[in-house]
Image: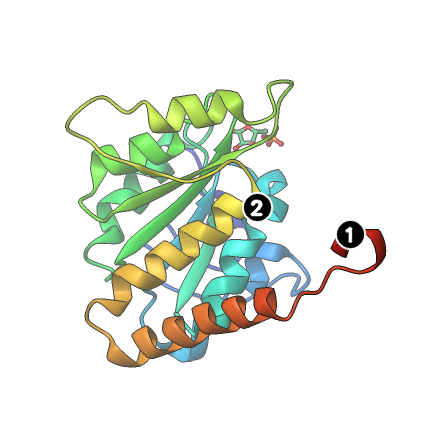
Amino acid sequence: MEQSPVKQSGEVGRAGAVRTAKKNPSEPAARKAPTSGRPVLVGVVMGSKSDYEVLAPAIEILEEFDIPHEARVVSAHRTPDWLFEYAEQAESRGLRAIIAGAGGAAHLPGMLAAKTLVPVLGVPVPATMLNGIDSLLSIVQMPKGVPVGTLAIGKPGAANAALLAAQMLAVTDEALRARLRAWRAARRDEVLAQELTGEQGA
Ligand code: RP5
């Protein structure tokens, strides 16, 4: 069995128990401690630390909506045992959604989905010469029976994955629903306030 990179980061053990020790608070994974000791509801996992920048908008949205979450590196092809463990424990740990981003062949979302009934939202990461088209096709083309909700390539997809997770949670959370309504209204108002200048408005 391979060692969990998350365990190595000093944040979470293989059993999924949250640890407080952090080797380096500036590390992306270390910054993503579960909020206020509340149970984690959304897991954000990525195939490599190099995917973090693309997944960051998902984390920012979850923080904005005050949704307890965690961020973990889980590689389908380099840490398959850790992937199985994460997926197998997701339901008992109380996760309500998993956002999974990966580049290249991007089998992480599909493999997670194969091992848990917790809904998996896949984010294709542009990490190769194919700029995420490879990951998009890999994630979206799950055979019938094991669905992965697939979002757009890159940061917009990551943000939308978090918004979708929030909307899923809002089905049973009126306060969160109100925050989502307010967020949408703010986006509407931003657009209504936009004015074209000079030749743009001709
Ligand atoms: C995938 O390979 C990861 O999701 C990442 O997008 C890509 C490259 O990984 P690194 O070589 O940067 O670790 O598994």
- What residue appears at the point 50 percent right and 71 percent down from the top-left corner? 64
Q: Quadrant of residue 3?
A: top left
From the image, tell me which residue sits under label 2.
Answer: 155
**Tag 1: residue type?**
Gln
Q: Is residue 179 above or below residue 139?
A: below
**Residue 179 image offset from top left, x and y in percent:** 39, 77
**Residue 142 image offset from top left, x and y in percent:** 28, 25
**The image quadrant in which ligand 1 is located:** top right
Q: Secondary structure at mark 2?
A: helix
Q: Secondary structure at mark 1?
A: helix
In the rendering, which numbered label is found on residue 101? none
Judge whether residue 104 can be spotted in this image.
no
Seen from the viewer's position, the closer of residues 12 and 103 is: 103
Q: Quadrant of residue 143?
A: top left
Q: Is residue 79 above or below residue 167?
A: above
Sequence-earlier tag: 2 or 1 = 2
**Tag 2: residue type?**
Lys
- What residue appears at the point 41 percent right and 42 percent down from the top-left corner? 100
As drawn, the residue found furthest toward the front would be 202
Seen from the viewer's position, the closer of residues 11 and 126 is: 126
**Mark 2 and mark 1: Cα distance apart in space:** 28 Å
From the image, tell me which residue sits under label 1.
Answer: 200
Q: Is residue 139 left or right of residue 146?
A: right
For disc 1, the neighbor class at 10 Å (few under 14, some 14 to 19, many from 20) is few
